[in-house]
Amino acid sequence: MHQELIKRAGEIIEKNTGAGTHCVLALIDLDGYPAASTITASKADGIRWITFCTGLGSTRVRRINQCNRASVCFNSEEYNITLVGTMEVLTDPRIKKEMWYVDWKEARGVLTDEQRGKECGRI
């Protein structure tokens, strides 16, 4: 049963990762209070790891740097899965590029026309 739950959780996360999806990420704010916000999970490997994209100067990053404990919740009328763990801020441009999803980069103006064509070709 345990492995079945882990497999199902991974399927739910996969279904709710990338453009057009969202989940709730809960962090501890700078005053020590819980703070939850809606965010898109950009990539995931089952329940092993999940990545999110946000600006390095954002409140989320300041919160993670102060306290890296976090919780993420994926839910709908059919399910509710909440995971807890620790977060790290990734700054290596190579890794960040792998973790972004196309719509996120386009919305932020990160892609050139040439890159946009290559990204769309992979879809």
Image (spheres, grey):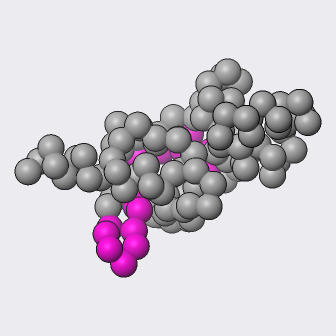
30 or 53: nearer the eye? 53
Query: Along the horizontal axis of the image, is 38 left or right of 55?
Result: left
Q: Residue 91: in sight, yes or no?
A: no
Image coordinates of residue 86 in percent, x first then y, are 40, 40
The location of residue 117, given as percent across then percent down, is: 82, 35
Point out residue 60 in the picture as x, y percentages from the top left corner.
Answer: 61, 51
Residue at x 44%, y 55% (from the top left corner): 15
Quadrant of the image for the C terminus? top right
Which residue is at 33% across, 43% downward?
47
Q: Quadrant of residue 81?
A: bottom left
Question: In this rendering, does residue 104 appear at all?
Answer: yes
Q: Residue furthest right?
A: 113
Residue 10 is left or right of residue 21, and the answer is left
Magenta stretch: includes residue 61: yes
**Range of residues picked out in magenta:** 60-80
Answer with left or right where residue 26 lies relative to residue 109. Answer: left
| Residue occupying the point 58% across, 55% down | 40
Of the pair 23 and 85, the residue shown nearer to us: 23
Instruction: Give the residue at x 72% y 48%.
Output: 104
Does 66 lie within the magenta span? yes
